[in-house]
């Protein structure tokens, strides 16, 4: 019985603490009593960093004997790993938590756990405390390792647990339960020190701290040995990696060190900040065997005045000259970016400079956001005279311009042969396949599903707004 239990429940992982052992025994006893494994339903909102944290949270839950379900109605524990970057992200979380009220009423043993960025905003934590009394446990991004202790406390004391302290160091040694598929996340640092004036992230994720290069290399090798074909190094400001380590390492040097490791894989990184993106970084990509010839390099605005107000610490001239250097050194390199529309005080003229810049760069993809006021940030106090309807008009205009640019980019690939990492069956099912190119574009083709998880060569024959299509060569 115990043998079967171990295979079924522990997922081969060891709980990270004595409290984790305690929770594991609690789950074991339940299984012996009922013949049923307690199930967790977990969901991460927000960015890749949060998705990577979510894999660690899942790993910790698995190590304590929880199974997983994709149906929240049948869960014994529901965990939301939250995001606070825009108001809409918070609204989504509160909507999801609100929807659990009846489930908790009919199953008082249901454990509801809220963690991640949003919980680090004092206003949001207060709202959870006062208006959502059925939420059991609340803690932030830098306390994931304490999840077992929080669960134990909740079970033993029956008191709700609210925790706001954050670890100053990146958390090491937590088991991860990686999502399936050929791609893996690898966080190399935590936090952000940039304080862009609109952004809540430095407040909710705390100060920057880098992981030791040896730890990163060890995890990188493990990921490759598990058969992953693409590894994305993560950090809010990934290219400022290495500052503050006992022996400082620069980001391009870390890339060089990882790139030297043999294997059939792609290496990506995000998000790089233009102020820390150097020619040295471009030179490493130019010489590398594994780094994709694509950089996500968020510019946010094409107006130098707005960039100054945003506290971005580069000019459009700096940005464009780096892009020009990269294009000269690395033929075929492509770029994507984030843009904020409607930053406080942005004028029509500023906005037109953004349109001009995106045309000049010719991004393969653009992630566009309407400015969202985040209390506590500097920009929250800036005068913001442009009406919401006007900002929405600009936003739609930006989308239309990018659609044209993106289509032209896709069209330019017709006739070329692209290396593609096949990651799923295509939208139309059957013998269709979908994958990503080096530029992270969706590529659709036809072929057998046993190619999923492998690299293939595809001759591009057509294009759509959001994807290119082609014939599988090999
Ligand atoms: N560290 C990354 C991105 C973090 S958040 C970087 O610096 O690029 C992801 C994107 O959300 C940002 O690039 C920005 O475009 C957008 N964003 C952040 N705060 C925002 C806000 N208050 N309103 C609208 N968009 C915002
Ligand atoms: Fe936010 Fe700026 Fe840090 Fe990115 S670099 S997370 S936009 S403060
Ligand atoms: Fe959101 Fe936190 Fe990421 S606020 S965008 S989940 S760092």
Image (spheres, rainbow, N blue to C red):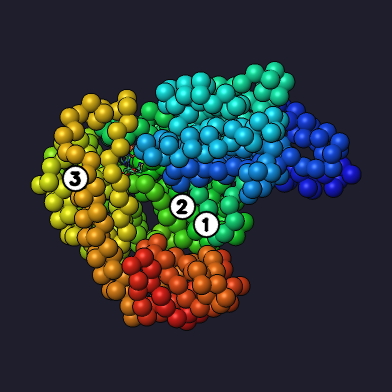
- Ligand 1 in which quarter: top left
For marks 3 and 1, the one nearer the N-term is 1
Q: Position of residue 191 (x, y in %)?
A: 41, 34
Residue pointed to by mark 2: 232
For marks 2 and 1, the one nearer the N-term is 1
Number of residues whose C-alpha sits closer than 10 Å to that of mark 2, classed few (under 14), some (14–19) or many (20 or more):
many
Whether pointer 2 and pointer 1 mark residues with C-beta atoms closer than 8 Å, the reply is yes
- What distance separates the C-alpha of mark 3 from that of mark 1? 40 Å
Specify the label residue 103 is tagged with: none
Label 3 within 8 A of ligand 1 by Cβ: no
Name the foreground residue: 432 vs 145.
432
Q: Residue at x 51, y 24 (%)?
A: 131
The image quarter in which residue 10 lies: top right
**Mark 1 secondary-structure assignment:** strand
In the picture provided, is 292 more to the left or to the right than 182?
A: left
Q: Single out the residue that lies furthest toward the left.
A: 349
Residue pointed to by mark 1: 183
Mark 2 or 3: in front is 3
State which quarter of the image contains the N terminus. top right
Residue pointed to by mark 3: 390
Q: Position of residue 313 (x, y in %)?
A: 21, 38
């Amino acid at each position: 019985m115990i043998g079967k239990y171990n295979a079924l429940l522990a997922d081969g992982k060891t709980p990270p603490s004595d409290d984790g052992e305690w929770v594991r025994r609690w789950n074991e006893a339940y299984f012996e009593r009922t013949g049923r494994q307690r199930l967790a339903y977990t969901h991460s909102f927000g960015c890749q960093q949060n998705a990577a944290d979510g894999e660690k949270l899942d790993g910790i839950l698995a190590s304590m004997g929880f199974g997983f379900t994709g149906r929240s109605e049948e869960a014994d524990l529901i965990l939301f790993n939250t995001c606070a970057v825009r108001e809409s992200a918070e609204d989504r979380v509160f909507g999801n938590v609100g929807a659990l009220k009846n489930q908790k009423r009919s199953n008082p043993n249901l454990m509801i756990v809220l963690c991640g960025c949003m919980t680090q905003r004092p206003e949001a934590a207060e709202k959870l405390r006062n208006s959502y009394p059925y939420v059991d446990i609340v803690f932030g991004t830098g306390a994931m390792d304490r999840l077992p202790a929080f669960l134990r406390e909740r079970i033993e004391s029956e008191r709700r647990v609210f925790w706001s302290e954050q670890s100053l160091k990146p958390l090491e040694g937590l088991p991860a339960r990686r999502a399936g598929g050929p791609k893996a996340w690898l966080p190399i640092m935590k936090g952000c020190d940039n304080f862009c004036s609109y952004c809540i992230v430095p407040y909710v994720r705390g100060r920057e701290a880098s992981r030791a290069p040896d730890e990163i290399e060890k995890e990188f090798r493990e990921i490759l040995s598990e058969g992953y074909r693409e590894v994305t190094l993560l950090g809010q400001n990934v290219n400022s990696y290495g500052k503050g380590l006992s022996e400082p390492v620069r980001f391009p040097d870390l890339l060089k060190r990882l790139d030297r490791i043999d294997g059939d894989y792609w290496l990506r990184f995000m998000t790089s900040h233009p102020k820390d993106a150097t020619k040295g970084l471009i030179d490493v990509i130019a010489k590398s065997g594994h780094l994709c010839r694509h950089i996500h390099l968020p510019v946010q605005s094409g107006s130098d005045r707005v960039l100054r107000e945003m506290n971005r610490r580069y000019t459009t001239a700096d940005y464009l000259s780096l892009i020009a250097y990269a294009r000269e050194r690395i033929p075929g390199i492509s770029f994507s970016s984030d843009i904020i529309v409607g930053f406080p005080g942005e004028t029509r003229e500023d906005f037109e400079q953004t349109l001009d810049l995106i045309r000049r760069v010719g991004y393969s993809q653009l992630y566009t956001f309407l400015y969202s006021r985040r209390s506590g940030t500097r920009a929250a106090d800036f005068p913001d005279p442009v009406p919401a309807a006007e900002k929405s008009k600009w936003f739609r205009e930006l989308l239309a311009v990018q659609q044209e640019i993106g289509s032209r980019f896709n069209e330019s690939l017709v006739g070329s042969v692209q290396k593609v990492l096949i990651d799923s069956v295509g939208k139309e099912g059957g013998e269709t396949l979908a994958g990503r190119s080096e530029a992270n574009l969706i590529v659709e083709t036809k072929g057998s599903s046993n190619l999923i998880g492998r690299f293939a060569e595809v001759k591009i024959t057509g294009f759509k707004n959001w994807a290119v299509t082609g014939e599988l060569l090999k």
